[in-house]
Amino acid sequence: MVKILFETRHKAALGIALLLLLGDFYFFSGKVFFVPFLAVVAIAATLPYWLDIMAENRRQKDVETRFPEFVRNLSGAIKSGMPVAQAVVHVSEGDYGSLTQHLKKLAWQIEWSIPFHRAFINFGKETENPVIRRAIATVIQAEQAGGNIEDVLVSVTESLLQIKKIKEERKSSIHAQVMQSYIIFFVFLGVMIVIQNLLIPYMIQFGATNTETGVTAAQIGGGINLQAQLDFSSPVNFFISLGGWLMSLNGIFLLMSMIQGFFAGVVLGKLAEGDLTSGLKHSLIMMTVAFMLITFAQSILQTAGAGVPGIAAG
């Protein structure tokens, strides 16, 4: 699990985001780029956290990939006649990428006479990898039950390699589906833009002029505020009017698109890599694209007189 930190770079990102927000109010207030530019502000503020999540995911993948190599080398050292503790210290001197620092700690603990089982359990906790923790638990339980440590390590290595192979096959087979999901999402956004900015205004205009059926614009709106506007007179008035705008037709369509983007990305991560957090990068891409396209289309079409009023035009 990624630990949420608040370091200097996070503070710098918030400062940059604040400057961009002030610039947005100063340069684009009441113009078509104002709301879409808010996505840039949000990305600037949260980018370090997204990078932390992605870096942790990469580290976990590297740790999980390197662990079978360590176990294989450890098994070979034990077969050569080394005691288990000495074999761990010897094997940990190699280069195992992101796993190296954890192996160094493991070797130090064994050299400090910490019991082998306790040192291995600490090693599994520090990696924060569920696959490694399960493998270590299997090795310890089998060894305590009287099993041959060499045979156990060989079996664990084979199991880990098989798991890795299955994950790679799943990721490869799901690649086409990932591309299809992105295409479907963009089609979804296109449909949402057409419905909101072309179909609904036409229905409202048709209902307002259809005296024979008695259909009115208010009935078509179903109680949804179609005329909510953002107040750009001051930052305070803007944030006050933002709540009403989010409950209007523009806000509802925007929230629907972003919710769809978030969950579509999470599902893609689960299908491709078996981990929900791996889908956050897809969610970030989809939500950003949805926000910018939907709000930009709302502003452009309203300015052109084709959309439902919802954002004050400059």
Image (cartoon, grey):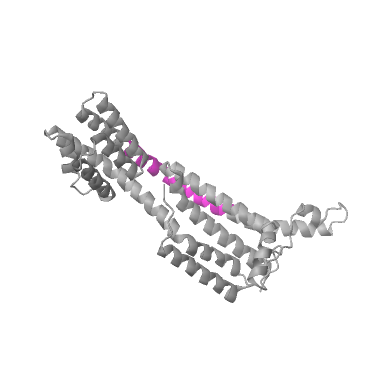
Along the line of sight, which residue is nearer the eye, 299 or 117?
A: 117
x and y percent of residue 16 in the render?
48, 69
The answer to which quarter of the image holds residue 309 is bottom right
Along the line of sight, which residue is nearer the eye, 299 or 312?
A: 312
Q: Does the magenta stretch include residue 148?
A: no
Q: Is the magenta stretch mostly helix, strand or loop?
A: helix
- Residue at the far bottom in the pictured view: 27
x and y percent of residue 96 in the render?
24, 48
Count of numbered circles on the image: 0
x and y percent of residue 10 in the render?
44, 62
The residue that appears at 59% across and 53% down in the rendered structure is: 257
Along the line of sight, which residue is nearer the eye, 222 or 76?
A: 76
The quarter of the rendered structure image containing the C terminus is bottom right
The residue that appears at 30% across and 40% down in the rendered structure is: 122
Q: Give the range drawn in magenta.
A: 163-188
Q: Is residue 120 left or right of residue 185?
A: left
The residue that appears at 33% across and 44% down in the rendered structure is: 127
Residue 197 makes an appearance in the image: no
Q: In this view, does 283 lie to the left or right of 78?
A: right
The answer to which quarter of the image holds residue 35 is bottom right
234 relative to 211, above or below: below
